[in-house]
Image: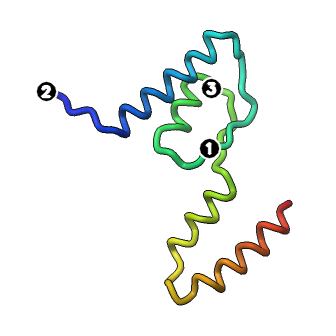
Amino acid sequence: MDQITDTQKAGHSRAKVLNDLRNRGVQDILIAVVDGLKGFPQAIEAAFSQTQVQTCIVHLLRHSMSFASYKDRKAVAVALKMMSQLMV
């Protein structure tokens, strides 16, 4: 018996929503900004193959903090904040 994980269930749910959008007449999505959920970019690309998928900058910045040591996080956060303000 196959075991279905929560990630697989969520991936199936996202694919279903995207297919429902296609069935309702959505022909194309130009850009999809995602939050890093596993399988979401693949589900988007499966339903809308020409879509440009990118990760939200806020989620990228938050994730990058996990690579900084605890004692350096304040300085890294200040540097990341300055960089994100330059991008706007």
Q: Position of residue 53 (x, y in %)?
A: 65, 40
Q: Nearer the viewer, residue 67 or 49?
A: 67
**Dot 1: what SS?**
strand
Q: Position of residue 75 (x, y in %)?
A: 66, 86
Q: Which residue is mark 2?
A: 1
**Dot 2: what SS?**
loop
Q: Which residue is mark 1?
A: 34
Q: Position of residue 66 (x, y in %)?
A: 51, 71
**Label pair 1/3, CB-CB below 8 angstroms:** no
Q: Earlier in the sequence, mark 1 or mark 3?
A: 1
Task: Note whether 12 is above or below 78 in the view shown.
Answer: above
**Dot 3: what SS?**
loop
Q: Nearer the viewer, residue 67 or 71?
A: 71
Q: Residue at (50%, 29%) from the top-left corner?
A: 14
- For badge 1, the amino acid type reads Val
Labelled disc at residue 49: 3
Task: Note whether 61 is above or below 30 in the view shown.
Answer: below
Q: Residue at (69%, 10%) from the top-left corner?
A: 25
Q: Residue at (53%, 89%) from the top-left corner?
A: 71
Q: Residues within 10 Å of mark 1 (few under 14, many from 20)?
A: some
Q: Which image quarter is the N terminus in?
A: top left
Q: Position of residue 24 (x, y in %)?
A: 65, 10
In-image side of 18 versus 39 (left or right): right
- For badge 2, the amino acid type reads Met
Q: Residues within 10 Å of mark 2 (few under 14, many from 20)?
A: few
Distance from Cα at disc 2 to Cα at disc 1: 33 Å
Q: Earlier in the sequence, mark 3 or mark 2?
A: 2
Q: Earlier in the sequence, mark 2 or mark 1?
A: 2
Labelled disc at residue 70: none
Quarter of the image for residue 49 reads: top right
Distance from Cα at disc 3 to Cα at disc 2: 32 Å
